[in-house]
Amino acid sequence: MLKLGRLLQKKFGQQIVISKDIFDAQVIDAVRYLPPSHMTGWWLTSESFNGDVLTLETIHYYHLAFKRPDILKYLALPFGFRFHLSTQTNIWFDQEVAKEAIE
């Protein structure tokens, strides 16, 4: 049980990249890259994202977990996966993202 607690503590302490309005967004696009140890690898953007990565922010995983528990199940996907949430949910493996991790 102690190992599980440490694992959860580590996961919740990792960081995630988000659009500033992700907590209220109805539409979310997400991709998981192979991360460094302090990051989850997830990048979550909303419809307001204009393509400028300087408009994104990095937060701790636990902030997202408590404010958007509806998306937690998707964050268990391994790197290389993407998901799109709107009126429907689409999940797929992106070969290009996985390929970048190998190169």
Image: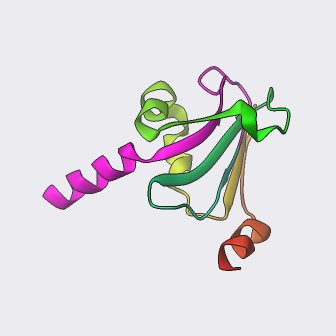
Closer to the camera, 51 or 12? 51
**How has the structure been colored for display?**
rainbow
Give the quadrant of residue 61: top left
Q: Does the magenta stretch include residue 14?
A: yes
Residue at the extreme right: 50
Residue ID at (79%, 69%): 96
Residue 103, position as x, y percentages in the image: 71, 79
Residue at the extreme left: 2
Q: In this view, does 60 lie above or below 90?
A: above
Residue 44 seen in the current view: yes
Residue ID at (73%, 71%): 100
Residue ID at (73%, 66%): 97
Residue 12, position as x, y percentages in the image: 37, 44
Closer to the camera, 26 or 49? 49
Residue 1 seen in the current view: no
Give the quadrant of residue 26: top right
Q: Is residue 26 magenta?
A: yes
Residue at the extreme bottom: 103
Looking at the image, residue 51 sits to the left or right of residue 36; the answer is: right
Q: Is residue 86 above or below residue 12?
A: above
Residue ID at (69%, 49%): 83
Q: Give the range drawn in magenta.
A: 1-29
Residue 73, position as x, y percentages in the image: 50, 46
Looking at the image, residue 3 sits to the left or right of residue 16; the answer is: left
Looking at the image, residue 4 sits to the left or right of residue 87; the answer is: left
